[in-house]
Amino acid sequence: MAFHAAAPAFPGLASGARLRSNDAASLRMFPTRRPTIAALPTCYPIRRHRGCIKAVSGNSDPLETSDSSLIVCFGEMLIDFVPTVSGLSLAEAPAFKKAPGGAPANVAVGIARLGGSSAFIGKVGDDEFGYLLANILKENNVNSQGMRFDPGARTALAFVTLRSDGEREFMFYRNPSADMLLEVAELDLDIITKAKIFHYGSISLITEPCKSAHIAAAKAAKEAGVLLSYDPNLRLPLWPSAESARDGILSIWDTADIIKISEEEISFLTKGEDPYDDAVVRKLFHPNLKLLLVTEGPNGCRYYSKDFSGRVSGLKVEQVDTTGAGDAFVAGILSQLASDISLLQDEQWLREALKFANACGALTVMERGAIPALPTREAVLSALVNMVA
């Protein structure tokens, strides 16, 4: 029996509700740059780009999309404060390094660093940190026309403690922060419906009005034939309770085409079952899912589809800060899928794309902070050639 409860495709959006797009004519679009599947080192076999596979069934299938390679990332963008010395509590840390972050924004920047085309949709405060984050997107060639600024709420902050093993603990300041206040009426639906992939997490589901905006955006993307990518990104301190977190994460589970989860998230969602047991993981595989990815840190990742499954080893590196590693992995695999969605049906080439994604994650843990550590395509290709798996 699957652990996700049956739920309406887009809970929380009233039947017949109308969505409207903001007039963004005066806002500059960043140029679209098409990545190629040749984003693999020359020591690997390179496949000629084949384009999208036509869907066997109706036009609503995400495999039948436009020629655009744009990936739209929806959710939070914030400032991470990371201790300059690892292994200390927040109170003991002598100083903190300011770093832009927020999982969806990390993915958007990661894709752009890899040569892909990405956009970010979310809300920040009408304050110095908000404009700092907007400039970060601009500097990294991320389309920010869907970004909004709230004059009545501050940009979210997160203090992140780094244990001696590089793992993290969080303290958030968002009561409420601007990202929680994005409204349906503020969505830029034009850019959402033109995307190849729409990527999101679960933090935007915690409170209204952002929850309704999240559901409306995903509904618009789905109806436009856009591939939906979901990384739950569990942050228990932000939810009212563990049960509400589990229910919230699973409430949209069945709408996603691609899901990326960690070992810890499998244990959480299955209430303590073994995350290394394929039978347990398969319980989380819903009928419409095309790809389920399980990240295992330095050990690489596992992949599950309807037709095949397996494991791809990671690269061995010295961990400094694991912040953003999962987001870098997601950026790596989505940048490949945006170029050639047929990877979802070809295990050999999916494995090559996952090697690339694993390398993205590995390089990110070698520096402090999320966005500052995200690698370029050239760095990833070099790592794949020179580092030991």
Image (tube, rainbow, N blue to C red):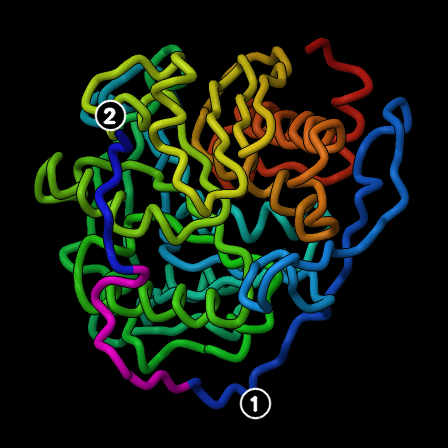
The correct choice, above or below, for 289 with respect to 63 in the image is above
| Quadrant of the rendered image containing residue 118 | bottom right
Kindly identify the amino acid type of the residue bearing the numbered disc 1.
Ser
Kindly identify the amino acid type of the residue bearing the numbered disc 2.
Thr
Query: x%, y% of residue 379?
Result: 74, 32
Residue 172: say if magenta.
no
Instruction: Name the residue carrying label 2.
Output: 270
Whether residue 305 is visible, yes or no, is: yes
Of 52 and 294, nearer the camera is 52
Instruction: Name the residue carrying label 1.
Output: 26
Q: Which residues are magenta?
A: 9-20
Of 351 and 284, nearer the camera is 284
Type of secondary structure dominating the magenta stretch: loop
Instruction: Tell me the CA gap for discs 1 and 2.
Output: 47 Å
Question: What residue lies at 71% left-to-right and 59% top-to-bottom?
Answer: 54
Query: x%, y% of residue 70?
Result: 64, 62
